Amino acid sequence: MTRGQTLLGVDPGLRRTGYGVIRCDGAQLAHLAHGVITAPTAAPLPERLAALFDALTALITKYAPDAIAVEQVFVNTNAQATLLLGQARGALLAAATRSGAPVAEYTALQVKQAVVGYGKAQKVQVQEMVRRLLALAEPPPPDAADALACAICHAHQSRHPLAAAALANVSGVTRRKGRLRWDAAALAQLSRNGEQR
C-alpha cells in the first residue's frame, strides 16, 4: 500500500449499507469516518437504489478516496433477498467506479482473515479488532465495522501483520501454525461485551 492513502470501505445492503473511511500511512492506520447509509424502505426499488448511489457518490466527493474496497455479496438460499442485495451492490459499485478510484472486492472470509486472523470470525470479533486497529473508544456498529474492516483488508492487501501486532498482548489469543486463535473464554467475553452495548 502506497503511503498516505485514503481508503473507503463499503459493506453493501439494500436497507443498511455500512461505510468506513481510513487513512493508511505506511503501517499506520487512522480512522476518519464511519456510518450507515439507509434508503427509504417504503420507496419503490428504483428510488432506493438511486438513494444508495447518491449517498455513496456524496461520500466519495467528500473524502476523495484513493481506493474503494467493497465486500462481495454472500449468496444465501433466499433467491429474492440475494437478487435485491445484488441490485443494491450494483448501484454502489456503479457509484464507486464512476468516481475513477480503483475498486477492489473482497469476500467476507478474506476480510475476516485480514482483520481478525480467522476467516470464520464472529461479528463481535471483527468489531473489537476494528476498534483496536483504529484506536477507537468503542467498537463501531456491525455494518460500519464490516465496512471499516473491508478498508483495513485492502490496506493489508490480504495480509494481517497489524492484526497480529494488535493482538500481541491480548489474553485468550494465541498464534498456532501461523494463524491467530481465540480461546472459548475470549470469545465468550466478546459476546458478553456485544450484548451489553
Image (cartoon, helix red, strand yellow):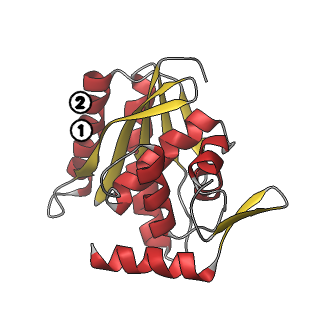
Q: Position of residue 117 (x, y in %)?
A: 66, 56
One can see residue 13 in this view: no
Classify the position of the N terminus by image quarter. top right
- Helix, strand or loop at label 1? It is helix
Q: Is residue 18 left or right of residue 185?
A: left
Position of residue 146 relative to residue 20, above or below, is below
Rounded to the nearest whole Å, what is the CA distance between mark 1 and mark 2? 5 Å
| Residue at 27 percent of width and 48 percent of height | 35
Q: Give 147 or 126, whichever is nearer the viewer.
A: 126
| Residue at 32 percent of width and 27 percent of height | 60
Q: Give 168 or 82, whichever is nearer the viewer.
A: 168
Which of the 4 quarters of the picture holds residue 75?
A: bottom right
| Residue at 33 percent of width and 79 percent of height | 195
- Helix, strand or loop at label 2? It is helix
Q: Position of residue 42 (x, y in %)?
A: 14, 64
Q: Position of residue 148 (x, y in %)?
A: 43, 46
Mark 1, residue position: 55
Position of residue 88 relative to residue 31, above or below, is below
Tags 1 and 2 touching, CB below 8 Å: yes
Q: Is residue 41 left or right of residue 119?
A: left
Classify 10 Å Cα crowding around label 2: few (below 14), some (14-19), many (20 and above): few
Q: Position of residue 6 (x, y in %)?
A: 43, 25
Classify the position of the C terminus by image quarter. bottom left
Q: Give 155 or 92, whichever is nearer the viewer.
A: 155
Which of the 4 quarters of the picture holds residue 182?
A: bottom right
Say what amino acid the circle numbered 2 marks: Ala
Say what amino acid the circle numbered 1 marks: Ala
Mark 2, residue position: 58
One can see residue 81 in this view: yes
The circle drawn on residue 145 is none
